[in-house]
Amino acid sequence: MLILTCPCCGVTAEETEFHGGGEAHVTRFGPGSSEDDFHGYLFEKVNPKGVHFERWRHNNGCGKWFHAARCTVTLEVFGTYSAQTTEPPQDIKDKISAKRPGWSWREFA
Amino acid sequence: MKRYSAFAVAREALRNHMGWERAWASPEPKKKYDVIIIGAGGHGLATAYYLGKNFGITNVAVLEKGWLGGGNTGRNTTIIRSNYLQDPSAAMYEKSRSLYETLSQDLNYNIMYSPRGVIMLAQTEHEVRGYKRTAHANALQGVTTEFISPQRVKEIVPIINLDGPRYPVLGGLWQARAGTARHDAVAWGFARACSAMGMDIIQKCEVTGISREGGRVTGVSTNRGDIACDKLGIVVAGHSGHLADMAGFRLPIESVSLQALVSEPIKPCMDCVVMANTVHGYMSQSDKGEMVIGGGTDGYNNYTQRGAFHHIEETVRALVETFPMISRLKMLRQWGGIVDVTGDRSPILSKTPVEGVFINCGWGTGGFKATPGSGWGFAELMAKGHSPLCNEFGLNRFKEGRFIDESVAAGVAH
Ligand SMILES: Cc1cc2nc3c(=O)[nH]c(=O)nc-3n(C[C@H](O)[C@H](O)[C@H](O)COP(=O)(O)OP(=O)(O)OC[C@H]3O[C@@H](n4cnc5c(N)ncnc54)[C@H](O)[C@@H]3O)c2cc1C
Ligand SMILES: [Zn+2]
C-alpha cells in the first residue's frame, strides 16, 4: 500500500485516493515529428527496477495532477512535487541520492 | 533419463523408492553455448525444449536467477483457454491448448492437464454482445466455443448466484476443452526433458549484463561468470524491461504486480473455471480442494511480488456476490507475481535491435496457457529467423500500428 502526499492540497493519503498516470517528464511529439520520435513517445517505456518518476492524480481529493519519485522495488516514496515542471527538482534528486547513491533515470541522475 | 511409468512405480515400491533419479542435472556453466535462454520459467524452458526437439539444437543453456518455475510460472492460477478474439491470438493460444492435450505423454511427466471447461460470464448487455462476437470469431478460427444461456450456466455451476444483486448473469462464453494444469509440473516436465537432451539448466545464475560487438550479441555476464553465445533469448516476463535496458533498447511494456489467493480446502463444489470480468474476479477449485482466486493488478509499476492490499477486498467482494456460499471460507495464502503488460495486451515474440537477441515477453496476466505454444513458435523464430505463429507478434507492430487488441477479451487478469 502506497502512501502519498499531494503537493497541491497537502493531504497525505493511501493509494486508493489517488490514480497513477504513468511515466513522468515525457516529451510529447506531435504530427510533424519523425516516426521514431513519435514511436518513442508513445511506446518506449523505461519501466525501471528501482528509482522511478511518475505522474499521479489526486482524483478522490483535490483532483489535481502532481509528480512522485519512488522506488518500484521497495515502494518507498522519495517525495512528491508540482506538475508544473519538466524535470525533477534538485531537492528531490538530493533526497534520492542520499538513499540510492549513483542512481540514474533516463537523462536524469 | 529413466522413464516414469506404472511399472517404475511398482519397481520402486519393491525397493523402498531408492531408485528414483534427480529429474534434472545442476551443471556448472560452460564457457560458450550456441543458444542461451535467460529465464527458466515455463516459456524459457519450453523454448529450449522445442529448440532441441524440433530443430536438433541442444547446445543450450537456460539461466535462472532464482529457482526454476519460481517466477510467474509458479504463481499463476493455471487457467488454460483459447477463446480470444483476434486471429493471431487464436492461432497461438489454440496451438498451445492443443499441445497441452498431449503434453504429459510427450514429456513423460504428468502435468495434470484438466480440460474441465471455462465459462466467462456475461453480466452486462455489452458483454453479451462481446462474447457472442467472440463465439462467432472462434467458429471461423476453428476454436470450439459457444454462447450459453443463464440456465446452462446454472446447470454447469450449481453454486452460482444468477440474479445479481448488482450484475445478473445474462449468459456465458463456454469453452468445454479449456481448463487448468499443474503449473509447477509444466516447468518441471520441460526442465527434465531439456536436461535429458543434454541442455544445461543453471539455477541461481542471474544475468547482469549483455555483451555486444558491432551490434551483435556475444554473450552475457552473470554472478557465475561470463558466458558466450551465438544467440540469446530473453524470456523473463516482469523483468523484460530490465533486461532490455542491459541490451540497450526499450520495450512497450510496464511491469506491475498481479495477485492471487487460495482458500482452505473444501469438498468438491465446482468442477470448472468461472471468470466474471465485469465484477473482476475468477475462481476454480484445485485438486486439493482449495478455491483458487485471481485478483487484480496494481495501478502503478512495481516489482514487489506482493500486490496492493485493497485488491483482496475488491476481489473477494465480487466473488461473494457471485458465489454466496464462499462467504465463510478462510483464505490460506496470498501472493503476487510481476507481470509484463503491453498496451494491446498481446505478447511480443520478436527479433530485437540487437542482432542475435530475441525476446519473448508481454504475456502479462495471461501467459501460462500459452507456455507450450509460445515455446514452439519462439524456438522456430530463434532457429530459422521467422515463424508463422509469431509473425504478427513482432516488436515492429507498435510502430506500424498493427495492434493485436485483446484488451477487451482480457478484461480480467488470467
Ligand atoms: C497471480 C497470477 C495469476 C495468473 N493467472 C494466469 C492464468 O490463470 N492463466 C494464464 O494463462 N496466465 C496466468 N498468469 C500469467 C502467467 O503466469 C505468465 O504469463 C507466465 O507464467 C509467464 O511465464 P514466463 O516463463 O514467461 O515467466 P516466468 O515464469 O516469470 O519466468 C521468468 C523467469 O526469468 C527469471 N529472471 C528474471 N530476470 C533474470 C535475470 N536477470 N537472470 C536470470 N533469470 C532471470 C525469473 O526469475 C523467472 O523465473 C498469471 C500471473 C500471475 C502473477
Ligand atoms: Zn490534493
Image (cartoon, rainbow, N blue to C red):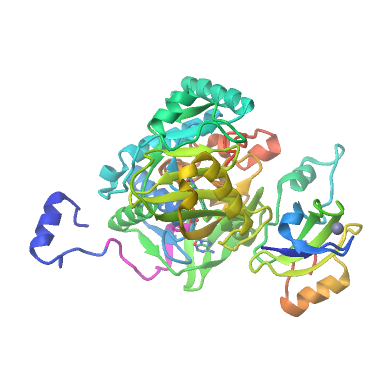
Residue B135 percent coordinates (x, y): 50, 23
From the viewer's side, name the closer residue of B30 and B65: B65
Residue A24 percent coordinates (x, y): 80, 56
Q: Is residue B233 visible?
A: no
Q: Which residues are magenta?
A: B23-41
Q: Is residue B51 left or right of residue B92?
A: left
Image quarter of the N terminus of chain B: bottom left
Q: Is residue B224 left or right of residue B243?
A: left
From the viewer's side, name the closer residue of B76 and B325: B325
Q: Residue at x 92, y 57 (%)?
A: A84
Q: Is residue B143 left or right of residue A109?
A: left
Assess whether residue B231 is covered by the magenta stretch.
Answer: no
Q: Is residue B337 above or below residue A90?
A: above
Q: Main secondary structure of the magenta part?
A: loop
Q: Is residue B226 above or below residue A32?
A: below
Q: Residue at x 7, y 62 (%)?
A: B14
Residue B213 percent coordinates (x, y): 60, 60
Assess whether residue B32 is covered by the magenta stretch.
Answer: yes
Q: Is residue B81 above or below residue B146?
A: below
Q: Residue at x 39, y 34 (%)?
A: B117
